[in-house]
Image (cartoon, rainbow, N blue to C red):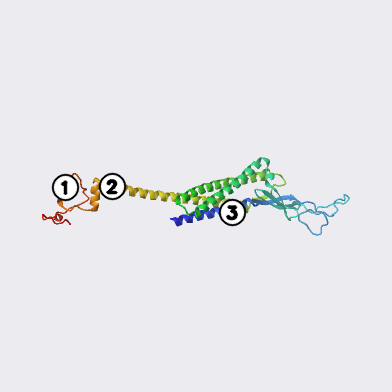
Amino acid sequence: MGIDRRRRASLALTLNFLALFLAVSALTTSYWCEGTRKVVKPLCTGPVTAKQSFCIRFNSSNINDTRLVQYIWETGEDKYVLRKFHTGIWFSCEQNINMSGENCRSFIYVAPANERGVLWLCIVAECLYILLLATGGILMSIEVCHFGNVIDGLKLNAFAAIFTVLSGLLGMVAHMMYTTAFQLTVSLGPEDWKPQTWDYSWSYILAWSSFTACMASSVTTINRYTKTILEFKHKRRNIEKNLKIKQKLLELDSPEQVWDMYISSVPSTAEELLDLSSNGRKLSNTSIFLDLNDLPDPQGEEYC
């Protein structure tokens, strides 16, 4: 039983540390969502030595000369370029116009003004999620390394389960708030940020995987606590049952001294047996059965 309980504790601790690692990785990265933005190509400047796909070419490089007629060769969809972007809780990054490097800005200021409070609550909930998850992991570590009595370990187990469950609930609320805030930003955000296409990325998957591992750790911890309590109750019922049986044996009709006498010795003569009966000492019907052949003879031989 002790080995099985320690294995369950190690499993819960492993799942807790996995959830903590995934949560920190998701919070510190900016790949919760990614997609593309459709923007108009800028004008090509300087001498054009090769065909450039990220700017609009003219028939002449001297765009300041008003006497020249400029011809634009790009038409239709060729005038646009798709720039990749990725967004996290903290930052939103987008490719530069020349497709090299990125330009990042705070996602809080990208979101509409009426949604910034939701984003701040999301950030607070994510930080509390990680804090409570770490607290639960510390309590589980102390329980695994603790060599005291079972009651102290059971108390640590209960507190670890409470912190882990609370952290899981906070994590779920934080992820849902970010999802809602991002979708509203896509619909109501600034025109220079609205994406053409977007989807959830690997940081978002890490966040929900962290929540799954956290809930698995909390379920394992609660299951271990419940199983230990049931084992104690089962042992207690067995002990109480044994005590009741012993008490019933002690509460028989025969007095205590006669009970002790039956256990220790048997009367040596028939006169002593009759004497016990005449003095009011009732003998139990199940205590001693005497055979007539076992009665001593008149010469007073010793009773066997």
Q: Which residue is mark 1?
A: 275
At horizontal 54% and vertical 52% (from top left) the residue drawn is 16
Secondary structure beneath label 3: helix
Q: In the current view of this chain or complex, which residue is farthest to the top?
A: 114
Residue position marked by numbered label 2 in the rendering: 250
Can the viewer see residue 229? yes
Q: Nearer the viewer, residue 261 or 283?
A: 261
Number of the front mark, 2 or 1: 1
Q: Are marks 1 and 3 in contact (CB under 8 Å)?
A: no
Amino acid at pointer 3: Phe
CA separation, marks 1 and 3?
85 Å
Q: For marks 2 and 3, give the CA distance.
A: 62 Å
For the C terminus, the image quarter is bottom left
Instruction: Compare residues 78 and 61 and report the one nearer the observer.
Output: 61
Residue underneath mark 3: 21
The x, y position of residue 90, in whole percent, is 66, 48
Residue 66 placement, left or right of 26: right
Q: Residue at x 24, y 53 (%)?
A: 264
Quadrant of the drawing holding the N terminus: bottom left
Query: Is disc 2 placed on a helix, strand or loop?
Result: helix
Q: Nearer the observer, disc 1 or disc 3?
A: 1
Question: Which x, y percent locates residue 59?
Answer: 83, 55
Side of 131 where 226 appears, left or right: left
Q: Earlier in the sequence, mark 2 or mark 1?
A: 2
Q: Is residue 50 left or right of residue 259?
A: right
Residue depth check, mark 2 versus mark 3: number of the one nearer the observer: 2
The disc, 1 or 3, on the residue closer to the chain's N-terminal end is 3
Mark 2: amino acid: Leu
